[in-house]
Amino acid sequence: MGKQKNILVLVESPTKINKIKNFLETGHPEVKFEVLASGGHITKIPNRGKDNLGIDVQTMTPEFVNDRSKTKNITAIKKAGKKADLIVLASDPDREGEAIAWHLKSLFTDENKVVKRMTFDEITPEAVLAAFDQLRDVDQDLVNAQISRQMLDKIIGFLISGVLQKATGLLSAGRVQTPALNILVTRDKEIKAFKEIAYQKIKVIDEQKNIHLDLNKDQQGVLINKPETYYLIKPLDEKIINELTTEYKCVDYKGAEFETRSFKPYSTAGLLQDGFSKLRLSSAQITMTAQKLYEEGWVTYIRTDAQRYSESFIQEAHDYIDKNYDTNLFAQPLKPKGKQGNVQDAHESIRPTHLSDTPWKIADQFDNDLQKRLYNLIWWNTLKSLMHGPSGINHRWTFDNNGYEFKQSWQEVKNLGYQILDLDQTDENIELDDNDQLVSKNHETAPALEKNNDFILNLGKDHIVNENAKTAPPNMYNQASLVRELKRLGLGRPSTYNPILTKLQDRSYVKYHKGKPIVVEDKGYIANNYLYAEFPDTFDVGYTAGMEENLDKISEGELDFHPWLKNIYDELSTKVEAEKLKVKAESDIICPRCGQGHLVFIRSYFNRGRGCSNFPITGCSYREYEQADGTWKEYVAPEKIDGEKKTTKKKTSKRSTTRKTSTKK
């Protein structure tokens, strides 16, 4: 550190201050450290200028102003910076944190100070001190990517939300929020339009021998009871049963080794999915609780797309499992399947900082039950993701009976893997597959079938079972499966999943019920139908995912964001202006008070509101607001008593002045 004696370290959250200060002072007792918190972003793009964007739309340069709520923080930081020999920016290790660091650095532009950046993925002595020994400059490419995201979201959100409000009275459209809503509306329409099909399942069952043969193909080799072929309906089922004999010849047998690995390293999306499916927590509860666990140093950084652990942690886990469990249980973590497009994995998956911090050892150090349960989930998932799962042999038999194909399978478990662990009260002990279905723990006895081909199975016709069945509609998304779908489609990022879900509910587009499917509200349908009728290209899934790819390119220094954003703005603003004229021309509801004007939607932050279009001309002040049952009711201003007039007038005047000032600036 040379001759540096007074060092100012800036973090985001006040809860990190004492820990980080202690780690640094212990590692460098010769240095005086002061650690302060910015409280997150200290600046914002104001709502003023062209289209209220706070952006120079010719050069695509944003205007930044200090957040008034952070005035005390900024004053304290600038004061401390004056006496510091070195200023270290230690905001979170992602694009947003990089942008925060950049804004903090700008506070010292005129001070001629040495300002450096440090990042760490876990708040432990080892990680913090290692980061302090590897100081670097602020990464401008990462800053540009984050600023581009802010401008992009504001351009699309503000421009389209304005015309959405004029057309429908609803307030909110968003670059990723709207495609997320469309995913829900599309699925809801599929479910409502679904018509069930009744069909038959023909099986041959001998319970004593654990034989369960399912009819799979007809005499022409066509699959039965599949949407892409046909469903077995009456009276065809009776014809098939009459044609079956008592002899079932095994024409094919296969035995293949398997291993079930249901536990994978947690990305942000994975944690949100399991937190919802296993703990029945909302995305907001999971996000806030995980952030607290990170700030307290119990888990690694909680915003990540990665599904990997560092080599040092894998070795630590290997040693821990060898010492505390069976040495043969350890297994390398699974790598994600398929193409991992748009993945930001600058840091590890979410895991305990140390496996030795077991849930039962540190249970009394958590602030509440939510923290305890979420830490338990992360700890056990991490442990099991580094262990072998149940393994053995999948046996599959194919039988022929008069040209009809029957199948039976049986999973022979030879090694239970992590399922052999003694049940601990801190472990939820819930194992789910990729579709959030419980993994069956198969301990059935072996069927009395030879493990080869060309044998005959004799079963009388009394073993034939003809079951009634019916098709089921697709499942509606819940918070977990929606996040999984957003990630699959390349929409959003770890830091945006929770805000997207929260905004959809805040705008009354959807409703969440604990542990249940999402309910799409009427307002969600209205917003979706309008936005996809008028702006289908803007909210196309492929187009939105392509934006994420371009943001990635900006973060890697491969794309200049100025012309890219300029092109988006120019095309969208032209479309929006045309749409505003169209919306105004289409208003045809006559004002019930004056009979001359038309009712047009007015800006309302609560229920939707409509007012007379003649208000600017004749002063007709008719207003009405949508009620909970969907009806509209005229607004009648409450009568004012003498003592209230002055107060009411003062409040109205203040609100009006604030708006005018904001617009002029």
Image (spheres, rainbow, N blue to C red):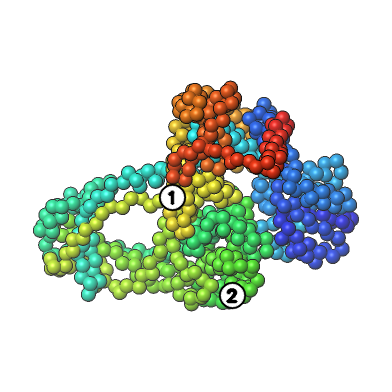
Q: Is residue 205 above or below residue 622?
A: below
Q: Left or right of 312: which side holds 421?
A: left
- Determine crowd level at label 2: few under 14, some 14-19, many 20+ residues with C-alpha closer than 10 A: few
Q: CA distance from mark 2 to mark 1?
A: 38 Å
Query: For numbered disc 2, what is the local secondary structure?
Result: loop
Q: Name the residue at 63% across, 30% down.
A: 51
Where does residue 320 sit, x and y in percent of width and height? 59, 73
Residue that badge 2 annotates: 360
What number is the disc on residue 548? none
Q: Are marks 2 and 1 in contact (CB under 8 Å)?
A: no
Q: Amino acid at mark 1?
A: Val
Q: Quarter-wise, where is residue 645 in the image?
A: top right
Q: Secondary structure at mark 1?
A: strand
**Residue 483 visible within the image:** yes
Quarter holding the C terminus is top right
Question: Label 1: how many residues lie within 10 Å, few (<14), some (14-19) or many (20+)?
Answer: some
- Residue 286 position in % (x across, y down): 56, 59
Name the side, left or right, on which 238 lies relative to 261.
Answer: left
Q: Please tell me in which quadrant of the rendered image residue 193 appears.
A: top left
Q: Residue at x 55, y 67 (%)?
A: 373
Residue at (40% x, 46% y) in the render? 187
In front here: 417 or 606? Answer: 606
Residue drawn at (10%, 58%) of the image = 242
Q: Is residue 541 above or below residue 466?
A: above
Residue 431's x, y, as percent? 45, 65
Residue 70 position within the rendered picture, expressed as x and y whole percent measured from the top left: 75, 48
Q: Amino acid at mark 2?
A: Trp
Q: Comparing marks 2 and 1, which lies closer to the viewer?
A: 1
Q: According to the image, label 1 marks what residue?
A: 519
Of labels 2 and 1, earlier in sequence is 2
